[in-house]
Image (tube, rainbow, N blue to C red):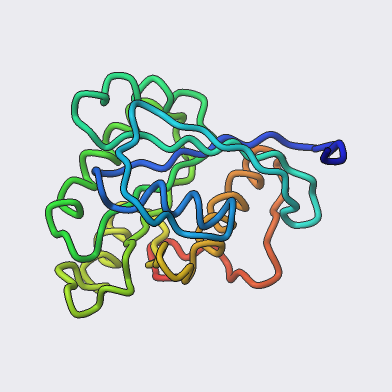
Amino acid sequence: MSEPFDYEYLLRVALVGDCKVGKSTLLSQFTEGKSLVDYRATIGVEFRAINTKIGGANVKVQIWDTSGQERFRFITKAYYRGLGGAIVVYDVANHSSYINVARWIKDLRENMNLGTPILLVGNKSDLSQLREVTTEEATNFAAAEGLDFMETSALDGSNVETAFRAVLGDVLSITSGRYFQEPYLIQPSQGKEI
């Protein structure tokens, strides 16, 4: 039986993007420290909660893993209202998933509060030999959209915790009205790669 966790803040963040970009594996890597072996499409929305510390504050984090399937878009859009932040994920080895990022961002901005933090994540950075989206291309897009950006590998865990903690730090700063920063994170990137 786990000990009770008294949290100061409840943060709600969603993972958004096309099917098969690795959203569920990113979530598993962040919450359990392991990647998923078998692919299983997310139906509608799945949810995980974790208790953690961010900048010294006790925080309960609810992470919504949304389906990338078109037939569930009307369901997933309903979850965007009231989000504290979002991580938009594309696959660096799948250019069409990158092209669709603009649509995901548009949906989020139409349904979230103005100024809600959005982090753009190019996942599967371990597939460098299959890369279809350059880091420079994504960095330029993120800068034009006013987003932070980083690349991750949900398979080997590279930058996964840093990505989640970056967006959670931004969400907590807005929620609390104070600036929180994890000791190993740099200042918000304003579109530059973190």
Image coordinates of residue 22 in percent, x first then y, are 34, 53
Identity of the residue drawn at 48% across and 35% down: 64
Residue 155 occupies quadrant: bottom left
Closest to the observer: 177 or 75?
A: 75
Above or below 41: residue 37 = below
Identity of the residue drawn at 53% across and 52% down: 167
Above or below 53: residue 191 = below
Identity of the residue drawn at 56% across and 62% down: 161
Q: Residue furthest front?
A: 38
Image coordinates of residue 144 in percent, x first then y, are 27, 57
Image coordinates of residue 138 in percent, x first then y, are 26, 64
Residue 3 occupies quadrant: top right
Closest to the observer: 104 or 63?
A: 63
Above or below 186: residue 171 = above
Identity of the residue drawn at 51% across and 31% down: 83
Asked whether, in this view, residue 140 is left or right of residue 49, the answer is left
Task: Count how many numbered circles sit on residues in the image.
Answer: 0
Image coordinates of residue 114 in percent, x first then y, are 44, 33
Q: Quadrant of the N terminus?
A: top right
Above or below 51: residue 70 = above
Closest to the observer: 159 or 55?
A: 159
